């Protein structure tokens, strides 16, 4: 197996596994996620929709046929997360977490195309 392929799959798994986990925490109403979405003034149904999107996109990343759709879904989720943290005037540490994940997503997108 080629080194590029191995690194690509490591990047995919490093994105997919946490996404599925964090999406799941939103689907099961984990207390800190509920508090975060309430602080952002978002309804709980929206938290569950985001959680479902994270789980679906995390799984979708692993399949060639759905990877670009999953990347697009993640881009929307991450842009929303960045905007929510900025709007809430969160510390830069909180804002930068989704920014770094977005950069990771861009790398996956570029590698998917080439």
Image (cartoon, rainbow, N blue to C red):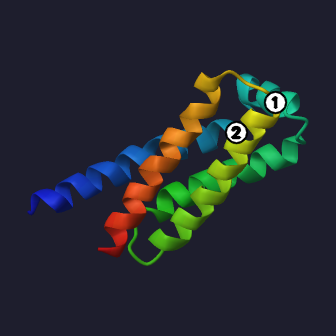
User: How packed is label 2: few (under 14 Cα within 10 Å), some, or many (20 or more)?
Assistant: many
| Residue 88: image tag | 1
Mark 2 to mark 1: distance in Å?
19 Å
> Residue at label 2?
26
User: How packed is label 1: few (under 14 Cα within 10 Å), some, or many (20 or more)?
Assistant: few
The image quadrant where one finds the N terminus is: bottom left
Q: Percent position (x, y) of residue 35?
A: 81, 25
Name the element at disc 2.
Answer: helix
Q: Quadrant of residue 69?
A: bottom right
Q: Viewed as shown, does residue 14 lie left or right of 29?
A: left
Question: Which residue is at 73% across, 24% downward?
Answer: 90
Determine if residue 87 is in view. yes
Q: Viewed as shown, does residue 83 lie left or right of 73?
A: right
Q: Is residue 58 placed above or below 84 in the rendered structure?
A: below
Question: Which residue is at 44% across, 44% downward?
Answer: 17
Q: Nearer the viewer, residue 74 or 114?
A: 114
| Residue 66: image tag | none
Q: Percent position (x, y) of residue 11?
A: 33, 50
Q: Residue furthest left?
A: 1
Question: Which residue is at 38% across, 74% downward?
Answer: 64
Question: Which residue is at 63% across, 49% downward?
Answer: 78
How many numbered marks does the figure carry? 2
Q: Viewed as shown, does residue 39 lie left or right of 63?
A: right
Q: Nearer the viewer, residue 88 or 22?
A: 88
Q: Quadrant of residue 2?
A: bottom left
Determine if residue 16 is in view. no
The image quadrant where one finds the C terminus is: bottom left
Q: Percent position (x, y) of residue 31?
A: 75, 23
């Amino acid at each position: 197996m080629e080194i590029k392929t191995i690194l690509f799959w490591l990047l995919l798994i490093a994105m997919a596994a946490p996404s599925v986990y964090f999406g799941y925490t939103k689907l099961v109403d984990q207390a800190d996620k509920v508090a975060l979405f309430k602080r952002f003034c978002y309804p709980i149904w929206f938290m569950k929709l985001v959680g479902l999107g994270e789980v679906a996109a995390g799984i979708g990343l692993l399949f060639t046929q759905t990877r670009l759709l999953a990347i697009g879904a993640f881009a929307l989720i991450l842009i929303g997360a960045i905007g929510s943290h900025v709007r809430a005037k969160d510390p830069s540490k909180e804002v930068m977490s989704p920014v770094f994940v977005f950069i990771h997503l861009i790398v996956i997108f570029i590698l998917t195309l080439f």
